[in-house]
């Protein structure tokens, strides 16, 4: 039986048709792109040395803010004391979505955008200023536009940062934001590497900031209901989980070219190794290039791997034995897997099969000895069918209840509490993806210890948990 709950279609999966084609396809200049973030051009690149002085910020902003920029309070439902100043880092596809969401909220005011691609950031700046000008009935020139994220972080009016950059940038942006006293909504995957994830978790707790990771199933009723059914043993003893997500892509080769005007390429690369510019790189294609992302085994997979760990906590608390196979492109720019099958076994006997969805039904299926429940963004099903109508009793286990990921974030910021997808959840789910990818690249079985967060007696695998950052960047 289908239990409908706010049917939603994921923009990437359903609009682009990813997951429909069962063969790797060539993605050229894809128009939807996460905005690449702003790297640093200083002689030192550590987050600790990345502060931009308030004096420098104010001096640089003077010209941009010379025109009228005060918006009457009547435009906003919330008074200034209860209004969030917003900065967005990375204004491509997802960053643009976050920006539009914040523009639509009367308790938010977008104050700055940041992207190394001038056309993207200037276009979003114009969108913001036109929006507030129309609300004001006049003119507005109060949205900053930066290539360097440190300048955005120095903006004295910004309370909350939205990060929508590629994974190779996330750790630096997250740590820099919390050190600057900002609360953060960051896109998944939380970090490119395991080591970066550990550093982010430590920084968030050290500086006492609220961070929501963009794993929106944690604020989605059907996923919570599925996991509550599993955790309260309505399907009996859980023994098997199937997880399937869209597979990756292959890319052609591309010749090096001069950096086009309006692109701060050094800032685009940031901590990634230097490679020459080409026409394919600074686009959606970075998802499938290991310098910037582990691939969709990580960046899409985190969504449903997180659902799996939500329903089966031992996936992120008990020891794991992991082995898998994957298919990688043999030529072209892409070097992340586009097909994979990974078997994950927990110490308490739960077997998880994690694949791209050419090899399994898209979604998450929990199987117990008395029934099953299957969930994806289109709905929830079960056997027996009556399970989806079960109301969880007051004395049974209830999970974090939220219905909108952005609203959950802002509520948590006001209450100074964790949101539905805090950093530890973002890190553990990301670890499942990273460990799975490592097993496929090593082509052998690995064992993961959650207590030490290391592979057991496996130096080769442990070396894969961190990567060097291109100078002058460091955490």
Image: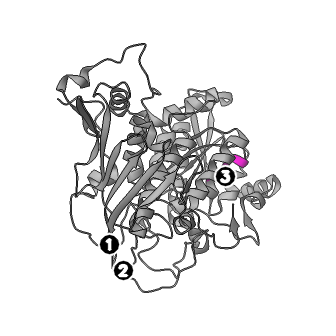
Q: Residues within 10 Å of mark 3 (few under 14, many from 20)?
A: many
Front-most of 131 and 420? Answer: 420
| Contact, mark 1 vs mark 3 (Cβ under 8 Å) | no
Q: Residue at x 36, y 80 (%)?
A: 332
Relative placement, left or right, of 201 versus 14 is right
Horizontal and vertical percent position of residue 371: 22, 30
Quick one: quadrant of the N terminus?
top left
Q: Residues within 10 Å of mark 1 (few under 14, many from 20)?
A: many
Mark 1 secondary-structure assignment = loop
Q: Residues within 10 Å of mark 2 (few under 14, many from 20)?
A: few
Horizontal and vertical percent position of residue 420: 50, 34
Front-most of 67 and 216? Answer: 216
| Contact, mark 1 vs mark 2 (Cβ under 8 Å) | yes
Task: Point out the tag, 3 or 2, that comes first from the N-terminus.
Answer: 3
Cα distance between the residues tagged 1 and 2: 7 Å
Give the residue furthest to the top: 394
Horizontal and vertical percent position of residue 336: 40, 69
**Labelled disc at residue 250:** 1
Cα distance between the residues tagged 1 and 3: 32 Å
Residue labelled with disc 3:
175
Horizontal and vertical percent position of residue 248: 33, 64
Residue labelled with disc 2:
332
Task: Point out the tag, 1 or 3, that comes first from the N-terminus.
Answer: 3
Question: What segment carries the magenta color?
Answer: 174-180
Above or below, 322 relative to 204: below
| Contact, mark 3 vs mark 2 (Cβ under 8 Å) | no
Cα distance between the residues tagged 3 and 2: 33 Å
Quick one: quadrant of the C terminus?
bottom right
Front-most of 137 and 328? Answer: 328
Mark 3 secondary-structure assignment = helix
Q: Residue at x 34, y 72 (%)?
A: 328
């Amino acid at each position: 039986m289908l239990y409908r709950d706010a049917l939603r279609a994921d923009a990437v999966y359903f609009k682009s048709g990813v997951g429909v084609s069962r063969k790797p396809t060539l993605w050229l200049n894809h128009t939807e792109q996460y905005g690449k973030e702003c790297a640093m051009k200083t002689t030192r690149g550590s987050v600790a040395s990345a502060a931009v002085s308030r004096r420098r910020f104010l001096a640089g902003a003077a010209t941009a803010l010379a025109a009228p920029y005060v918006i009457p309070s009547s435009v906003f439902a919330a008074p200034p004391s209860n209004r969030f100043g917003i900065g967005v880092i990375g204004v491509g596809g997802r960053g643009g979505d976050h920006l539009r969401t914040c523009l639509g909220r009367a308790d938010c005011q977008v104050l700055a955008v940041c992207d190394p691609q001038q056309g993207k950031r200037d276009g979003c700046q114009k969108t913001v200023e036109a929006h507030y000008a129309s609300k004001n009935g006049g003119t507005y020139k109060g949205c900053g536009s930066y290539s360097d994220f440190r300048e955005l972080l120095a903006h004295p009016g910004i309370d909350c940062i939205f990060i929508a950059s590629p994974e190779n940038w996330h750790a630096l942006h997250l740590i820099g934001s919390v050190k600057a006293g900002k609360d953060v909504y960051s896109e998944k995957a939380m970090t490119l590497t395991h080591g970066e994830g550990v550093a982010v978790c430590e920084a968030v707790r050290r500086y006492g900031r609220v961070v929501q990771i963009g794993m929106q199933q944690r604020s989605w009723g059907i996923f919570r209901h599925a996991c509550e059914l599993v955790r309260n043993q309505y399907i009996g003893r859980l023994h098997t989980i199937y997880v399937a997500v869209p597979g990756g892509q292959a890319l052609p080769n591309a010749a090096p070219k001069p950096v086009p005007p309006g692109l701060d390429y050094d800032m685009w690369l940031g901590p990634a190794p230097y490679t020459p510019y080409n026409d394919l790189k600074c686009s959606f294609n970075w998802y499938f290039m290991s310098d910037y992302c582990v691939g969709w085994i990580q960046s899409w997979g985190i969504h449903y791997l997180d659902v799996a760990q939500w329903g089966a906590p031992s996936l992120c608390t008990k020891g794991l034995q992991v082995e898998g196979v994957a298919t990688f492109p043999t030529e072209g720019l892409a070097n992340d897997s586009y097909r994979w099958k990974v078997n994950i076994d927990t110490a308490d006997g739960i077997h998880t099969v994690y694949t791209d969805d050419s090899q399994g039904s898209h979604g998450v299926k929990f199987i117990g000895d008395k029934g099953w429940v299957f969930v994806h963004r289109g709905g929830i099903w079960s056997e027996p069918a009556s399970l989806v109508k079960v109301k969880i009793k007051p004395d049974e286990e209830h999970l974090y209840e939220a219905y909108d990921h952005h609203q959950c974030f802002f509520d948590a910021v006001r209450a100074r509490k964790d949101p539905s997808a805090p950093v530890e959840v973002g890190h553990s789910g990301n670890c499942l993806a990273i460990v799975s990818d490592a097993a496929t690249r090593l082509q052998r079985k690995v064992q993961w210890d959650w207590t030490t967060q290391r592979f057991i007696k496996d130096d080769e695998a442990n070396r894969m948990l961190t990567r060097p950052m291109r100078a002058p960047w460091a955490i």
